Image (tube, rainbow, N blue to C red):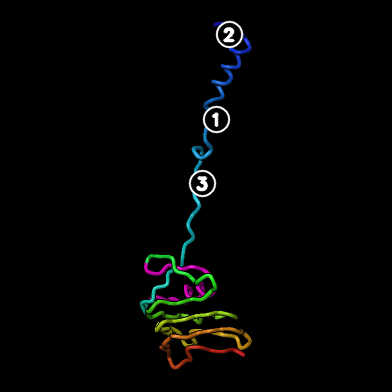
Amino acid sequence: MTISRRGFLGAILAAAAAPAIVKSDSLMRIMVPRPVLLTLWGDGVHDDAQALQALISGQSVAFQGRAFGPRPDGTIYLPVGTFAMGAAAIVGPGSKLFGNGSTLKALHDGPMLDIKNDDTGVQISGFHFIGRGNPGIKVKP
C-alpha cells in the first residue's frame, strides 16, 4: 500500500490536532451556586420576619431542611409553629396567608403584619398573635 505525500501530511496534521479536540465539559466545569435560602424557624426564638417577608414576596425559604414556598397561586400555608417577628412583614394586595393555628410572636414594639388600606384581596386567617400590647395586624390608611 502506497501513501501519497498529501495523504501523509494530512495524517500528520490530524494526529497533531487530535489532542486539542476534547469535550468542552472536560475543560472547565461551570458551577452554578444554589441560591441561599432564608430559614423559617418557627421555634419562637429565631427571628422569622425576613423569611416570612420572602414568602409573602413569592420566594422559597428553608424550613426543617427542605425548600418551602408559596403555592403556584401565591397562597401561603404556614406550618404550625411560633414565628418570632423582629419587624412587621408587609402584606401586599392579593396576599393569601393562612396560619393553620400558627402563632406570630412580636420581638419588637409594633404590629407583626402591615397592610395598606387600599390593598385589596388580602386574606389572613388561622393565626394567634402574641404581642407587647401592640396589634397583631395594622391596616395603614
Q: Of residues 32 and 47, which is closer to you in this image?
A: 32
Q: Position of residue 2 (x, y in %)?
A: 57, 6
Is the residue marked by circle 1 packed among few (<14), some (14-19), or many (20+) residues within 10 Å? few
Write down the quadrant of residue 4 in the picture.
top right
Residue identifier under label 2: 3
Write the start and end of the magenta stretch as one range.
46-64
Pointer 3 or 1: first along the chain: 1
83 vs 6, left or right, is left
- Compute the Cα span from label 2 to label 3: 44 Å
- Compute the Cα span from label 3 to label 1: 19 Å
Q: Residue at x 40, y 69 (%)?
A: 63
For the residue marked with disc 2, what is the amino acid? Answer: Ile
Q: SS class of the residue under badge 2?
A: loop
Q: The C terminus lies in which quarter of the figure?
A: bottom right
Residue identifier under label 3: 30
Residue identifier under label 1: 21
Pointer 2 or 3: first along the chain: 2
Q: The N terminus lies in which quarter of the figure?
A: top right
For the residue marked with disc 3, what is the amino acid? Answer: Ile
Q: SS class of the residue under badge 3?
A: loop
Is 136 situated above or below 48? below
The image's mark for residue 127 is: none
Q: Residue at x 47, y 86 (%)?
A: 125
For the residue marked with disc 1, what is the amino acid? Answer: Ile
